[in-house]
Image (cartoon, coloured by chain):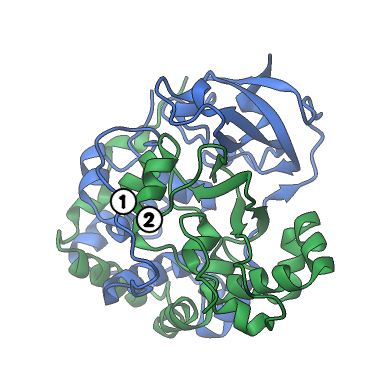
Chain colours: A green, B blue
Amino acid sequence: MPHDSDDHTHAHSVLPSDATLRVKAIETLLISKGLIDPAALDAIVDTYQNKIGPKNGAMVVARAWSDSAFYDTLFYDTTETVADMGFYGRQGEHIMALQNTDEIHNIVVCTLCSCYPWPLLGIPPSWYKSDAYRARAVREPRKVLAEFGVTLPSETSVRVWDSTAELRYFVIPQRPKGTEGWSEKRLAALVTRDSMIGTGFPKDAQ
Amino acid sequence: MSRIHDMGGRFGDGVVIPDFGKEAVFEKDWHARALAVTVASGFLGQWNLDESRHSREKLSPTDYSKFSYYEKWISALSDILVAKGLISVEELQSLHGARALDSLSDRVFTAEKVADGLSKGGPTLRDSAVVQLFRIGDSVKSKLAENRFLSGGHTRLPKYAAQKAGKIVGFHGSHIFPDAHAHGGGEAPEPLYTVAFEASTLWEHAENPSDLVMLDLWQSYLEPL
């Protein structure tokens, strides 16, 4: 069997050890070679900093809570349904919604890297990418949830979704009590990012 | 044998520190630049997603553990740029380089291409002649968590879920097979399933026997049980 021969050629070791300088170095070199466009870098940063984030996912959840026909379509074909709302793209090519109930609590992780539904939730937070979350969410999800202040009854079954392929998962949490008749906009304001990863609940109705 | 990134189930990593939505999207400016440089370089089309993942995974265990998230990205990017011949180690060292080949100039991810490029993505669902072997409800057993084409090669079967019994609970059509795609083996699409494993099958000290861990696994990772 062939061996992965690149193991011993770690080109990055010639770069400056300081991370800021390391990024600057590679960016400068690629620009000078004409391989990247500095204006494109600004546009990419602007997209993920300002345009794509958990507000997108919150709109989907709020609509799922409000519109039963939408809810059914969402679970029938999540990718198509959220794409119709304008949420599609890189790291969200195949999306599945997961339904939290009294019986089942879903949480999402990527133990191998940091797979996450970018078009709905944006760039993952540091803790999602941390060794501790990646290592522990599959083995002791209830202890991890407790660190987020989430305690579940033992009768509730926990389902941990390890994103090992190109399917990206997000959770439709349970609708908070006391929100009957609320508009989608008002509901969306209750939906937290963590509630769509499964490590939190939506905010209470005030 | 596994690589350092395959950490599911590992002991000793301490508590998770939530941010409750308060953290900035990019904590430091260089994080944003690292992401943007990596994404823009990817659009040159000289490597695919699986090759790019493997480039991060084969950082040495010492570097992988020591580097922060975006340090891994930028270091793996440098490695793959050299491996693919887009830059040389000498250029990395001197930070001066001759203009790249004209053949690449059309591929450069210019500012005008950003909105469209990011919103298109790269779906992995494909037609395939590979026969679907398993149906929803079938019991299966996962194989070893190793690339069967290449020793130390890329695979998406984590070792904590290797050689374990589970049940097929979802079928997603055929998707590009990372184990081939990361190593010049083409897309080699094959059936992809969601497999549910009982916590007590995976862990000696499961928190709750009724809990499940769900993984998306390609047909080659599975055998009938």
Task: Judge depth for marks 1 and 2 and give the one in front.
Answer: 2
Q: Disc 2 is attached to a residue of which chain? A: A
The answer to whether mark 1 and mark 2 are in CB contact below 8 A is: yes
Residue A148 is marked as 2
**Residue B98 visible at all:** no
How busy is the neighbourhood of tag 1: few (under 14 within 10 Å), some, or many (20 plus)?
many
Q: Quadrant of the C terminus of chain B?
A: top right
Residue B66 is marked as none
Q: Position of residue B90 (x, y in %)?
A: 23, 58
Residue B16 is marked as 1
When the figure is inspected, residue B120 is found, relative to residue A169, above or below; the finding is below
Q: Amino acid at mark 1?
A: Val
Q: Nearer the viewer, residue B78 or A202?
A: A202
Between the residue at mark 1 and the residue at mark 2, the CA separation in whole angstroms equals: 8 Å
Q: Amino acid at mark 2?
A: Phe
Q: Kindly state the secondary structure of the residue where label 2 is placed.
A: loop
Q: Nearer the viewer, residue B31 or A130?
A: A130
How busy is the neighbourhood of tag 2: few (under 14 within 10 Å), some, or many (20 plus)?
some
Q: Position of residue A110 (x, y in %)?
A: 47, 47
Q: Nearer the viewer, residue A102 or A57?
A: A102
Q: Spot the residue most to the top.
A: B225
Q: Spot the residue most to the front.
A: A178
Image position of A6 (left or right of B177)? left
